[in-house]
């Protein structure tokens, strides 16, 4: 557990991303973004590294994903 805290402090931490709206009527590109983050079910939450690229993914589809804390 102490190792995990040290990794988060050194690596910039993690963000929790929630998939809260369906991709049924979304474009294929939006569906690819959601699946590339490892999200498969509604209301699923995943932890990813807190990097600019991950925040960019969420920013591309804010109507489907949100960052929770």
Image: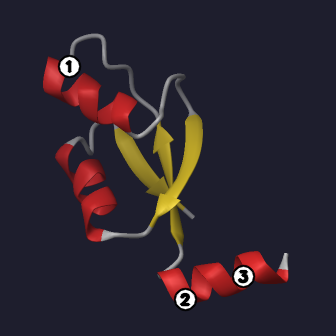
Identify the residue at the far top of this view: 24
Is the C-beta separation of discs 3 and 2 under 8 Å? no
Q: Which mark is residue 5?
A: 3
Q: Is residue 35 above or below residue 6?
A: above
How would you rate the neighbour count of disc 2 (Cα within 10 Å): few for under 14, some for 14-19, many for 20 or more?
A: few
Q: Residue drawn at (18%, 46%), measured in percent from left and top?
A: 60
In the image: residue 27, left or right of residue 23: left
Going by the image, does 34 lie left or right of 14? Answer: left
Label 3: how many Cα within 10 Å (few below 14, some 14–19, many 20+):
few
Residue 21, image x, y percentages: 39, 27
Report, in whole angstroms, how far the alpha carbon at label 2 lies from the one at label 1.
37 Å
Q: Nearer the viewer, residue 47 or 26?
A: 47
Q: Which of 15 and 7 is in front in this view?
A: 7
Task: Please provide percent x and percent y for residue 40.
Answer: 50, 23
Q: From the viewer's perspective, is the residue at label 3 or at label 1 nearer?
A: 3
Alpha-carbon distance for marks 3 and 2? 9 Å
SS label for mark 2? helix
Determine the secondary structure under disc 1.
Answer: loop
Residues marked 3 and 1 touching at CB (< 8 Å): no
Earlier-in-chain disc, 3 versus 1: 3
In the figure, residue 23 lies in which quadrant? top left
Say whether disc 3 or disc 2 marks the residue closer to the N-terminus: 3
Please name which of the two marks, 2 or 1, marks the residue nearer to the observer: 2
Label of residue 26 in the image: 1
Q: At which x and y percent is residue 26?
A: 20, 19
Residue pictured at 60% horizontal, 79% vertical: 8
């Amino acid at each position: 557990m102490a190792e995990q805290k040290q990794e988060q402090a050194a690596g910039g931490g993690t963000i929790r991303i929630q998939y809260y709206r369906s991709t049924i009527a979304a474009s294929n590109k939006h569906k690819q973004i959601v699946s590339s983050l490892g999200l498969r079910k509604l209301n699923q939450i995943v932890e990813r590294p807190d990097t600019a690229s991950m925040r960019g993914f969420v920013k591309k589809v804010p109507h489907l994903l949100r960052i929770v804390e």
